[in-house]
Image (cartoon, rainbow, N blue to C red):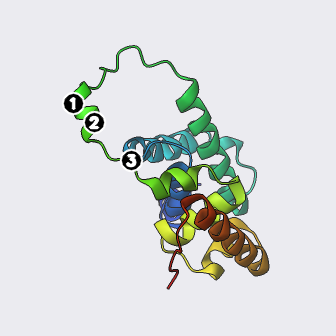
Amino acid sequence: MNHAEFEVHYNRYSRYVHAILMTRMPPANVEDALQEVFMEAWRKLHELREDANFGPWVAAIARHKTADFFRRKRPLEPLLDVHAARSIEPDPILDALQKLPEAYRETLALRFIEGMTGPEIAEMTGLTHRSVRVNLNRGLALLREMLGVQIDVR
């Protein structure tokens, strides 16, 4: 695979990887992690047996990257100022989304964070249209229950 072909894959799958990262790590770290995932994919491209498997392969790299993020020690990272920490407002919807089972979490992120349609999600993930609908409906029901609110999905 050359640079141009890799760029096509990046353009196609970056929203998918972004959604995976958003559901697994602090939002402030997602953009850097997104770039790290695709840099690692480029370095390990020789391990990819078929171009058709790029989506699931890069998704697995993203999932591993989030696990690595939480395993790493960050001794050089400065501590937050107590007053600054108080001004950071957590996003209750994103927090709840991150607590959902993986299938619902990623499907909902692709729909509501990345703005993909059901058919686009099915194509991106390899799920059937029915599975995507089920994941969206069940995920929304759990999210509504966790938040104690009605979520409008228009």
Q: Are marks 3 and 1 in contact (CB under 8 Å)?
A: no
Whole-Å distance between the Cαs marked 2 and 3? 10 Å
Residue 107 at x, y percent in the picture:
63, 66
- Badge 1, how many Cα within 10 Å: few under 14, some, many 20+? few
Callout 1, which amino acid?
Answer: His
Residue under the point 63% across and 44% down? 63
Element under label 3? loop
Callout 2, which amino acid?
Answer: Arg
Residue 85 at x, y percent in the picture:
29, 33
Callout 3, which amino acid?
Answer: Pro
Residue under the point 57% across and 38% down? 66
Q: Are marks 2 and 3 in contact (CB under 8 Å)?
A: no
Of 122 and 13, nearer the camera is: 122
Residue sticking out furthest to the bottom: 154
Which corner quadrant of the image does residue 118 belong to?
A: bottom right
Residue 114 at x, y percent in the picture:
48, 68
Residue under the point 48% across and 74% down? 115
Q: Which residue is mark 1?
A: 83
Element under label 2? helix
Q: Which residue is mark 2?
A: 86
In the rendered structure, find residue 92 and report the number of the disc placed on it. none
Q: Are marks 2 and 1 in contact (CB under 8 Å)?
A: yes
- The N terminus - image quarter: bottom right
- Asked if 73 appears above or below 5 in the picture, the reply is above
Q: Earlier in the sequence, mark 3 or mark 1?
A: 1
Q: Is residue 26 left or right of residue 144?
A: left
- Badge 3, how many Cα within 10 Å: few under 14, some, many 20+? few
Q: Is residue 124 left or right of residue 88?
A: right
Q: Which residue is mark 3?
A: 90
